Amino acid sequence: MTPVETMEEDHLKIIQLVSVVFNFFGLASRIPDPQSRVLVLDAAIEQGKSFVELLRLHIFREDNVLFVLAHKHIEKELLDRMNLH
């Protein structure tokens, strides 16, 4: 698996996790039973934590893997024109 494929897979996982979190929060607001609501909110929070950790890992990979590889493969003249280094 290439670094770009890994990043694209992260994007899909992030979208899925955000969807799950929002759906749990939406569901919790409609549940009349307080104990059940708390369980759904707990699940939403746990999935939210997973989302945050995946996003942190994704940003780390961008900064320390993907951008480093890009800098190795982009000619200095192009980087100068882009003013990125």
Image: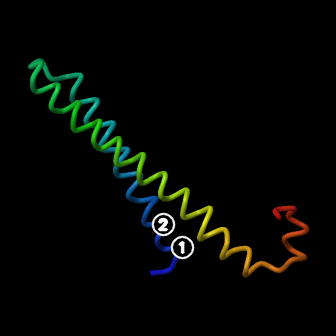
Tell me residue 84's x, y (percent).
82, 62
Up-down relation of residue 85 to residue 4 (above or below): above
5 versus 48 height, above or below: below
Residue found at x 84% / y 70%: 79
Q: Specify the quadrant of the image occupied by residue 48.
A: top left
- Residue 11 falls left or right of residue 65: left
Image-quadrant location for residue 78 = bottom right
- The image quadrant of residue 75 is bottom right
**Tags 1 and 2 in contact by the CB under 8 Å rule?**
yes
Residue under label 1, please give it.
Answer: 4
Quadrant the N terminus occupies: bottom left
User: Does 6 sit left or right of 31 as displayed?
Assistant: right
* 46 to the left or right of 54: left
Q: Which residue is mark 2?
A: 8
Q: Secondary structure at mark 1?
A: helix
Given the image, on which type of amino acid does mark 2 rest? Glu
User: How dense is the environment of label 2, judged by Cα within 10 Å: few (below 14), some, or many (20 and up)?
Assistant: few
Residue shown at 29% from the left, 36% from the top = 45
Q: Is residue 37 left or right of residue 56?
A: left
| Residue 10 image point, x, y percent | 44, 62
Circle 1: residue type: Val
Residues packed near mark 1 inside 10 Å, few (<14), some (14 to 19) or many (20 plus): few
Cα separation, mark 1 vs mark 2, equals 6 Å
Q: Residue at x 62, y 62 (%)?
A: 63
